[in-house]
Amino acid sequence: MDMDPVVVLAEELRTTERALHGAMKKYEADHCRENGDAMNGILTALKSLHREFFQTVPTSVLGAAELLRMVARRLPFAYAASARHFHEIADRLAAGRRDHADLVWLRAMRAAVGDGLWGAAKPVIVFRAARPPRRSPEEERWSLRRH
């Protein structure tokens, strides 16, 4: 049986992140150009690994758990409750338990993220009926002169 590619990529990501941390410490210590170049190379590799990781479909429960943990770590602090829930589901999946409620929650989160509810993808109009303040005739003339 082949190992899940998500598990392999997760381990590569962790190793690369540790290497980046070491390279950053070296660069901070001496600001040497070679250390900066090494750090940039590791950042490029890390970007590529992240892209590949999030495009890879897990083939096992362990891979799905790794993917959920990675998603939970990337959520902003405002979504700490959702991140905790992602971690709990990942722990249950890694232990071999699948609950129907978890699958329903994950599908709801997928729909929410797909609709762009977790970002600035959908602008919110607070007051549709509010009009901009009226300008006096003096202000109107002044703005026409400046253009």
Image (cartoon, helix red, strand yellow):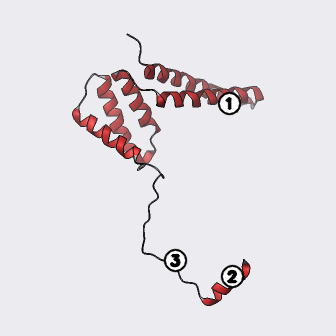
Q: Quadrant of residue 31?
A: top right
SS at mark 2 in the image: helix
Q: Amino acid at mark 1?
A: Asn
Q: Quadrant of residue 94?
A: top left
SS at mark 3 in the image: loop
Q: Which is in the foreground here, disc 1 or disc 2?
A: 2
Q: Is residue 53 above or below residue 79?
A: above
The disc label shown at residue 132, or none: 3
Q: Residue furthest top?
A: 1
> Left or right of 89: which side holds 66?
right
The disc label shown at residue 144, or none: 2
Q: Residue furthest bottom?
A: 137
The residue shown at (40%, 48%) is: 115
Position in image of residue 59 (x %, y %): 37, 21
> Left or right of 42: which side holds 51?
left
The residue shown at (36%, 22%) is: 62
Give the position of the N terminus as an image quadrant: top left
Give the position of the C terminus as an image quadrant: bottom right
Pointer 3 or 1: first along the chain: 1
The residue shown at (35%, 36%) is: 86
Q: Nearer the viewer, residue 118 or 114?
A: 114
Position in image of residue 83 (x %, y %): 38, 39
